[in-house]
Amino acid sequence: MTTDTTTAEAAAVSAPGETVLDARGVTMRFGGLTAVRSVDLTVNSGEIVGLIGPNGAGKTTFFNCLTGLYIPTEGEVRYKGNVLPAKSFKITATGIARTFQNIRLFSNMTVLENVLVGRHTRTREGLWSALLRGPGFHRAEAESKARAMELLEFVGLDHKAEHLSRNLPYGEQRKLEIARALASEPGLLLLDEPTAGMNPQETRAAEELIFAIRDKGIAVLVIEHDMRFIFNLCDRVACLVQGEKLVEGTAAEVQGDDRVVAAYLGEPFEGDPGAAEVAEVEAAEAASAAETPEATAAPEAPAAEATAPEAQATTEATTEDAPAAPGESTSKENDR
Ligand SMILES: Nc1ncnc2c1ncn2[C@@H]1O[C@H](COP(=O)(O)OP(=O)(O)OP(=O)(O)O)[C@@H](O)[C@H]1O
């Protein structure tokens, strides 16, 4: 990866349609394992883009390449045209914020303090200002606090500002993580499985929250296993399989793509074998009925009965595992 540092200041609101994230040829190898292979992905302002793929497909590794936790073995990542710095703390200052698959809050700090920590990249007061506690420091502190409270109100946690974060229910901890990420005034927000462990009501609330974030002009890239959530939410979806981008398109295009279905089933998807088998059985039944029904129905019937449930089972399995199925989730849920 090119390691030019950028001096770009973050600007949360981007021009409509501006390319906010431009990842090109991103490859990440761990020894002999290529976790991400030559992935290109762009995210434009005003967009919510989804990243899906079976477990181990390389989604989190790709996120880590975008946020400086990993330096890609090959490829380049640009934020608003500037090559990203190689250090993760500089990337936050550049304008990219993220949440994690495993919630990472400061559990012994209050809700408000957690958000204030997220603002540190946007406060200009230095060590001397903090030590001397002059008027500039107090003004900056009051501004940060006011902004943090605004963000808590935005995510619906202002009434819990003084609670310890460890005492929040799981869904609220996820919201707090989002508020903390927003505190750095990002132009791009990366969400790694934001609904993992949430109940359906919390998931719907998370969906509304992400739409509201997008409406503030912040581009969003989201990893999620809950297919109903992702296809409802995203303008565009990319599917990674074994480190490579298999498909990218609108939610409708991706959810109807046989290769995506096959990737989730873990086997090649050839036509519609369940329907073909059903047709074959029906044809055999019709042929036997056309002959002498009394003589042939008895021996034919068990064969038809034996085949029909099997064909039905194949169809059900396909429907059940398909990522497109509304309401279905291929999530490993909360296994990390
Ligand atoms: N630090 C690491 N060292 C070695 N291998 C790693 C490392 N991080 C990830 N991998 C491997 O890279 C591959 C991709 O993992 P990754 O966690 O990115 O997948 P994922 O799509 O996010 O999976 P999941 O949906 O289960 O979170 C896996 O085979 C994983 O074991």
Image (cartoon, rainbow, N blue to C red):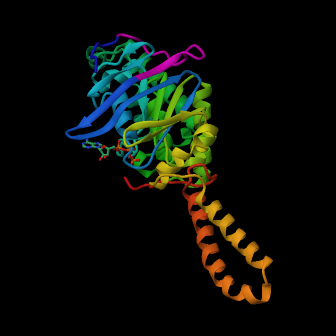
Image quarter where ligand 1 lies: top left
**Extent of the magenta region:** 7-23
- How many badges with numbers are in the image? 0
Residue at screen point 61% across, 37% down: 253
Position of residue 16 relative to residue 190, above or below, is above
In this view, the residue farthest toward the top is 7
Q: Is 314 on the left-hand or right-hand side of 140?
A: right
Position of residue 12 relative to residue 58, above or below, is above
Residue nearest the viewer, comparing 265 with 237 = 265
Residue nearest the viewer, comparing 221 with 52 = 52
Q: Is residue 14 magenta-colored?
A: yes
In this view, the residue farthest toward the front is 291
**x then y, percent, for residue 237:** 54, 35
Residue at screen point 30% across, 13% down: 5
In this view, the residue farthest toward the left is 31
Residue 317, image quadrant: bottom right
Q: Is residue 261 magenta-colored?
A: no
Q: Is 167 on the left-hand or right-hand side of 303?
A: left
Residue nearest the viewer, comparing 38 with 161 = 38
**x then y, percent, for residue 235:** 61, 32
Residue at screen point 32% across, 21% down: 90
Residue 120, image quadrant: top left
Q: Is 37 on the left-hand or right-hand side of 80?
A: left
Quadrant in which the N terminus appears: top left
Residue 161 at least partly seen: no
